Amino acid sequence: MKVMNQERQDNGRLRFVLHVDADEFDRDREKVYRKNRGKYVMPGFRRGKASRRMLEQHYGRGLFEEQAINENFNEYFVRALDEYGIDELATSKEDGPTFTLKGVVDGGYDVECVVPVRPEAAITQYKGLEAPRYALEVTEADVDRIMQTYVERATRLNSVEREAVEGDVLNLDYVGTVDGEPFEGGSDNGASLLLGSHTFIPGFEEQLVGVKPDQELDVNVTFPENYVAKDLAGKAAVFHVKVHSVQEREIPELDDEFAKDVSEFETLADFRADLAKQETERREQQATREFETLILNQLMGNTTVELPESMVQFEQQYVISDLKQQLQYEALYRGMKPEEFLRKNGLSEERITQMGRSQAEANVRLSLALYTIAQLEGLKAEPEEIEAEYAKMVREDRPLEKVKEEYPLSFIRPEILERKARELVLANAVAKTPDDYKATEVVGELPEEVPAEDNAAEEAETEA
């Protein structure tokens, strides 16, 4: 078996002729003969006893050829892809390869194959890319901020029968209305509110300073003009509030005993030193991720390639699925219903689809750039790397044999090549201090993830 006359076509497909040689074709016909010889009648012979040659002479030379080709060609095709390093891009049956039998040649046969493959990208530069790498020093104030989270966890709440002051925690129910009508997400029961935390919309908490347990009152506020829920932006609202309890916080002293209670350390100094060490490591990892993102953004900006629509749509399905799951987790984290969280953040189904499309296009552009670099650099997916990749996919209900059946080399090999190309690009990148770096205009960017707690929907933390 051999591949001949490879020719890349303009439509993102590779055309080649796959030749199955005479010995292989003869072996395949012999298998078909042995399996079917009992079906044929030959004068002078008992059924199934006539030789293959005699049957072919009697019925015609092509007696077993068609079945031999139909039953065995796919095996040769898969072998050809593997042995010649052709990574088929099969994202759907409609976009799959096409085959045309050209006829029997030299005792074997030729099949013209037209296979969808990754288009070649034009890259102006991928080595020596420059980006700023920020030095993120951990200060005593940073350690104080982290320490405060431990203090909050260890703080006790004691119910009091006095007027609430800033710093107290209220347990309350509320119902919000606009123009006398309740609105979605404007009500809650048993909510906890730390006065002074500014987690509700401006003006809400201030009007609750001085309330007592079991008190009911109306709180009048106006939603900010830039409020994330556009249907509420700039509108006046009334919240009817019932206060169940006022709780005073008993904040622990920051001393060695506190360190022993909340950590494995004997002294507060050792605990602070460990927090500083952990934060330094976290910031180092963050700086590395940000630097790598800037470099890969530049790589995409240096890349010109026509994105295969089938590849983008295929990627988009997974991106949107992951995005929706991420949004659900974010909603649960904030104690909100998913639909309420989406509405407050202006995330309609159409917007999510747009975000998914944008990220899918960026993912595909980067993938094609890295794959092209792998070809230019002659990178290879070694057998042990391929086996290791397969081993990662093995599960109790999916043994190695089934994994290999479901995921051909043309699926595994590009992932390995792209990973190696990514490592090559980043290893050759140059980190600059922000002052020395001159920003490079970027054509395409890796989309940001769903906003995290610190920057997502600043005002949507209110349950109103």
Image: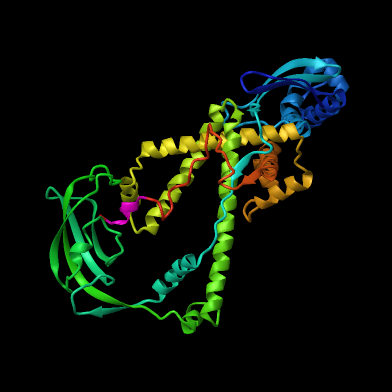
**Residue at 77% in and 35% down:** 378
In the image, 224: left or right of 23? left
Residue 206 coordinates in the image, percent (x, y): 21, 63
Q: Quadrant of residue 76?
A: top right
| Residue that sits furthest to the front in the current view | 435
The residue lying toward the viewer, choosing from 114 and 291, is 291
Residue 461 coordinates in the image, percent (x, y): 32, 56
| Residue that sits furthest to the bottom in the current view | 257
The residue lying toward the viewer, choosing from 119 and 274, is 274
Q: Quadrant of residue 386?
A: top right
Question: Could you tell me if residue 43 is visible in this image?
Answer: no
**Residue at 78% in and 21% down:** 65
Which residues are drawn in magenta? 457-463
In the image, 100: left or right of 154? right
Question: Height in image: 101 above or below 406?
Answer: above
**Residue at 63% in and 56% down:** 396
